[in-house]
Amino acid sequence: MKELKLSRAAEIVENGVDETLAYMYFPSQHWLRIRTNNTIERVNREIKRRTRAIGAFPDGQSALMLVCARLRHVAGSAWGSKRYLNMQHLFDQELQAETGREAAV
């Protein structure tokens, strides 16, 4: 890439590799959920749908109240209480790391 006079772009790609692949430090069972933001997008779509149905708000406070009401609804519903990640994988990974450190000593 550097030969094509894209040195700045190549530098950005090289510097961003660690951030881009940071999800790979977690257990492989978590990769799909960590590398996407589908949950946030779903909440945002729901808020957008509700605010479009209202149309115009008298002030910012009323819009904020609607958003907060939707977030409370999501948090209180079965969808909001569903476990997104099985944290046992992280506990097992940490236990293995501790065992490996003890064996090295």
Image: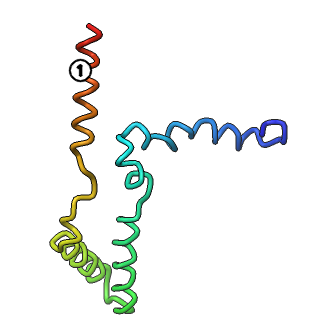
Question: Percent position (x, y) of residue 46?
Answer: 35, 79
Q: Residue at x 42, y 43 (%)?
A: 23
Q: Residues within 10 Å of mark 1 (few under 14, many from 20)?
A: few
Q: Nearer the viewer, residue 78 or 92?
A: 92
Quarter of the image holding residue 82? bottom left
Residue at position x 40%, y 65% in the image: 38
Q: How many marks?
A: 1
Colour mode of the rendering: rainbow
Q: Secondary structure at mark 1?
A: helix
Q: Position of residue 25 (x, y in %)?
A: 40, 36
Tell me: residue 52, above or below residue 73.
Answer: below
Q: Give the quadrant of residue 91.
A: top left
Query: Horizontal and vertical percent for residue 32?
Result: 42, 53
Q: Which residue is mark 1?
A: 99
In the image, 50 versus 21, the foreground residue is 21
Quarter of the image with the N terminus in it: top right
Quadrant where the image shows the C terminus: top left
Vertical comparison of 15 with 43: above or below: above
Which residue is pictured at 24% across the width and 50% down the height?
Answer: 86
The residue positioned farthest toward the top in the image shown? 105
Which is more toward the observer, 64 or 72?
Answer: 72
Q: Is residue 30 above or below residue 17?
A: below
| Residue beneath the point at 78% across and 43% down | 6
Amino acid found under the numbered disc labelled 1: Thr
Residue 24: x percent and y percent? Answer: 44, 40
Q: Is residue 79 left or right of residue 54?
A: left
Residue at the extreme right: 4
Q: Is residue 29 left or right of residue 15?
A: left
